[in-house]
Amino acid sequence: MNLPERIDSDLKDAMRAKDAAKLGVLRMLKSALKYSAIEKGGAESQLDDAEAAQVIRKQVKQRQDSIEQFEKGGRPELAAKEKDELAILTAYLPQGLGADELSKIVRETIAEVGATSKAQMGAVMKALQGKVAGRADGKALSQEVQRQLG
């Protein structure tokens, strides 16, 4: 079962269970997926798992930004709601890389590319993007590459 099908199935389960919070998040996610599919290739277009995961990551990033803003603005009740939505969304993303795994992959990629200075960081980052495929945050990747090249 691919990711969009799994989301549809979970949406139906949330309807049956009358889980309003999960239902709202999944409807919003399904809408974002459909919108992205239409942008890609028209009304009948379908997203593959990688494209669907990218849409979910975008939704996760929006929730993280909202949580930060609500906490700065002194609105803990809204931040808590966003955190609940974030937990639902992250269940659909692939398992992230641990610090040790990330460090190992970065070290191997630097060796493959033959990078020796921060000037070659772009080549390393480009090679890494394909390897980690959304399992690590770009900011964390960048920091680790800088640490190892510095």
Image (spheres, helix red, strand yellow):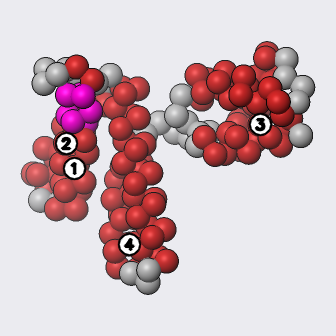
Q: Which residues are magenta?
A: 33-39
Q: Position of residue 101 (x, y in %)?
A: 71, 36
Q: Give the crowd class for mark 2: few <14, some 14-19, many >=20 residues within 10 Å.
A: few
Secondary element at image label 2: helix
Real-space CA distance between mark 2 and mark 1, rounded to the nearest whole angstrom: 5 Å
Q: Position of residue 131 (x, y in %)?
A: 61, 23
Question: Distance from label 2 to label 4 (Cα)?
Answer: 23 Å
Residue, disc 2: 31
Q: Work out whether residue 149 or residue 79 is closer to the camera in this orientation and state it.
A: 149
> Do the numbered discs 2 and 4 sit on residues whose CB atoms are within 8 Å?
no
Task: Identify residue for label 1.
Answer: 28
**Label 3 sits on what residue type?**
Val
Chief secondary structure of the magenta portion: helix
Q: Which residue is mark 3?
A: 145
Using the numbered discs, state the Cα–Cα distance from disc 4 to disc 1 in whole angstroms. 18 Å
- Depth check, front residue: 63 or 122: 122
Three-letter amino acid code of the residue under disc 2: Ser
The x and y percentages for residue 86 are: 39, 57
